[in-house]
Amino acid sequence: MVFDIYQLLLLSGILPADYLVANSHEVKQITLTSCCSVRGIFTSDNLYDFVTLPTEMRFKFNFDISKWPQHFAWLELPEDVMHD
């Protein structure tokens, strides 16, 4: 799952528009709830897909990268939720 934290904050309406300073963002905490297993959390200013994802952020697998979508789902939030 890919979370666009900036877009989620804008859509939530929690922060007033004048509260955000251009090009400065800070995430102090990410809270996961429910019964889930998290392998790792990474932050980046770059938007990746499964092909361009850096090696240290990838799942380990023993098949050709072109078969990646057959084994895993790539979900971008809020984009994929807003368009479904």
Image: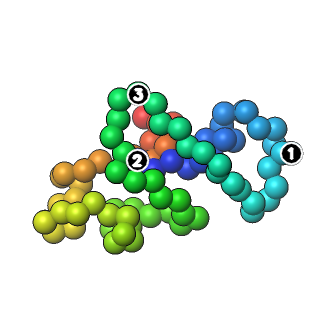
**Residue 73, above or below 34:** below
Task: Kindly identify which numbered label has been placed on residue 18.
Answer: 1
Report the side of 63 relative to 52 (left or right). Answer: left
Residue shown at 53%/59% (left/top)?
Answer: 43
Report the side of 43 relative to 63 (left or right). Answer: right
Report the side of 18 relative to 83 (left or right). Answer: right
Task: Kindly identify which numbered label has been placed on residue 1.
Answer: 2
Residue shown at 54%/63% (left/top)?
Answer: 44
Residue that mark 3 sits on: 34
Residue shown at 80%/50% (left/top)?
Answer: 20
Q: Position of residue 59 (x, y in %)?
A: 27, 60
Indicate which disc, 1 or 3, sits on the residue closer to the N terminus: 1
Residue shown at 69%/41% (left/top)?
Answer: 10
38 and 9: which is toward the camera:
38
Indicate which disc, 2 or 3, sits on the residue closer to the N terminus: 2
- Disc 2 crowd, CA 10 A, few/some/many (<14, 14-19, 20+): few
- Disc 3 crowd, CA 10 A, few/some/many (<14, 14-19, 20+): few
Determine which quarter of the picture holds residue 54: bottom left
SS at circle 1 = helix
- Nearer mark to the viewer, of 1 and 3: 3
Q: CA distance from mark 1 to mark 3?
A: 33 Å
- Looking at the rendered structure, the kind of residue marked 3 is Ser
Q: Position of residue 70 (x, y in %)?
A: 18, 52
SS at circle 3 = loop
Determine which quarter of the picture holds residue 23: bottom right
Extreme left residue here?
62
Indicate which disc, 2 or 1, sits on the residue closer to the N terminus: 2
Report the side of 30 relative to 10 (left or right). Answer: left
SS at circle 2 = loop
Q: Position of residue 52 (x, y in %)?
A: 38, 70
Q: CA distance from mark 2 to mark 1?
A: 29 Å
Residue 81 visible in the displayed image = yes
